[in-house]
Image (cartoon, rainbow, N blue to C red):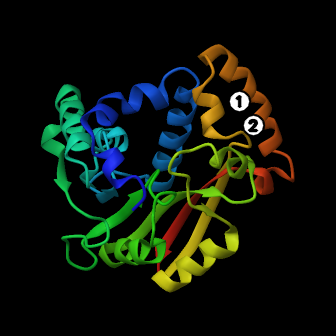
Amino acid sequence: MKGREWYQTEQVATEYELKRFSGGGQLIDQREKRAVLEALAPLEDRRVLEIACGTGRFTVMLADQGADIVGIDISAAMLGEARQKAQEAGASDHLQFLRGNAGGLPFPDDHFDTVFAMRFFHLADDPAAYLAEMARVARRQVFFDTFNRFSTRSVYNWMLPMGSRLYDDEEVTGLLGEAGLELAGANHDFVLPYGLYRQLPGAVADVFRRVDTGVIETPAGDSLASVSYWNTMVA
């Protein structure tokens, strides 16, 4: 997987949320959390697995909402940050963190009601294998996001040291079919790339976001979106 070593460093783990979700990045954090909550609700007593849970942004939030949740990540440094976050939020008793590889999940078939992954598939070297493994351990639902090929993300992508894997709708549809998943719904957002928002102060980013949202709400909005959220069900 792209960035495997980079994401496991102590410095990256410590600075991860500050660099990505401060200033204009808060708008990204808010939108992603809303996408997850809307797709996974109701959460009370739902058994959930988060793939590549990182610093526990979503894991801790969902535990607080009543989910019985496990977060798995390959980075010990990221998991250290996640455990600290869970302890500070008083959620340690309601979730579990494991170090492991998403390509070989240590769970039996149909073990979770829902399996989800955010900020994962743009780094995946074998998305079909990862998605199939997620579907294997999911009894009901698989939720994930992608960055879109025909969007401003493709322009921004060349500046990134690792780059990102970008997807079009046809590729996602093919991956779902291979994994035995059926599309239940999709949402598309952010005409402007995440990298731009992260460079802006909050007040300035708010202005850009209002314009961005206005474009997304037009008939052409979906085709211009740089991010897609895919809600799927096990066939």
Mark 2 = which residue? 213
- Quadrant where the image shows the N terminus: bottom left
- The foreground one among 152 and 70 is 152
Is 146 located above or below residue 55 in the figure?
below
- What residue sits 20% from the left and 72% below the top? 107
Residue 1 visible in the displayed image: yes
Residue 213 lies, in percent from the top left, at 75, 37
Instruction: Tell me which amino acid carries mark 1.
Output: Arg
Residue 6 lies, in percent from the top left, at 35, 46
| Relative horizontal placement of residue 102, taking residue 96 as reference (left or right) | right
Residue 201 lies, in percent from the top left, at 61, 16
| Relative horizontal placement of residue 206, taking residue 1 as reference (left or right) | right
| Relative horizontal placement of residue 211, taking residue 57 as reference (left or right) | right
- How far apart are the alpha carbons under marks 2 and 1? 6 Å
- The foreground one among 19 and 213 is 19
Instruction: Tell me which amino acid carries mark 2.
Output: Thr
Mark 1 = which residue? 209
Q: Residues within 10 Å of mark 1 (few under 14, many from 20)?
A: some
Residue lying furthest right in this view? 219
